[in-house]
Amino acid sequence: MLEHNFNKIVVLYLLHCSSMSGTSSSKVVRQETLALQDGEEVLARWTDDGWWYRGVTAGRGEGDDTYVVADATGYMEQVARDDIISDQEHKFDTIQV
């Protein structure tokens, strides 16, 4: 069930991206930000290309509100908490243009 809902967010985001023209950016709107646990499965926006990828948290980053996230290939990146969607909170999120 969680994976189905998680994949729904990915599909909605990809549909949004495919319908965009120009350089508009999307923004995840959430009502509250929860602390993340090590090993938690998340969607994270990578800073190099701005795309959202599935990943797993690997600890807190060096910044005040950042986390280290590992993607499926093992690549790790420090990601701002605002650019992370967790299973615990994603069901209340919307993607806004």
Image (spheres, grey):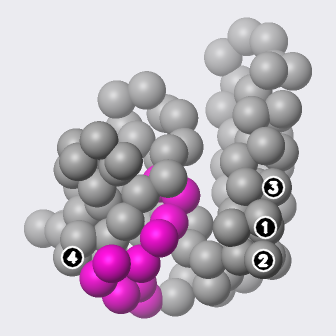
Determine the CA span between mark 2 and mark 1: 6 Å
What label does residue 56 carry, if any?
none
Which residue is label 1 attached to? 5
Q: Secondary structure at mark 2?
A: loop
What label does residue 1 carry, if any?
2
Determine the CA span between mark 4 and mark 1: 24 Å
Query: Circles 4 and 1: CB distance less than 8 Å?
Result: no
Query: Circles 4 and 3: CB distance less than 8 Å?
Result: no
Q: Nearer the viewer, mark 4 or mark 1?
A: 1
Q: Is residue 81 left or right of residue 12?
A: left
Image location (x, y in percent) of residue 26? 70, 40
Q: Nearer the viewer, mark 2 or mark 1?
A: 2
- Which residue is rendered at x = 71% and y = 48% of the image? 10
Which residue is label 4 attached to? 59
Q: Predominant secondary structure in magenta?
A: loop
**Mark with earlier residue (4, 3):** 3
**Mark with earlier residue (2, 3):** 2
Q: Quadrant of residue 78?
A: bottom left
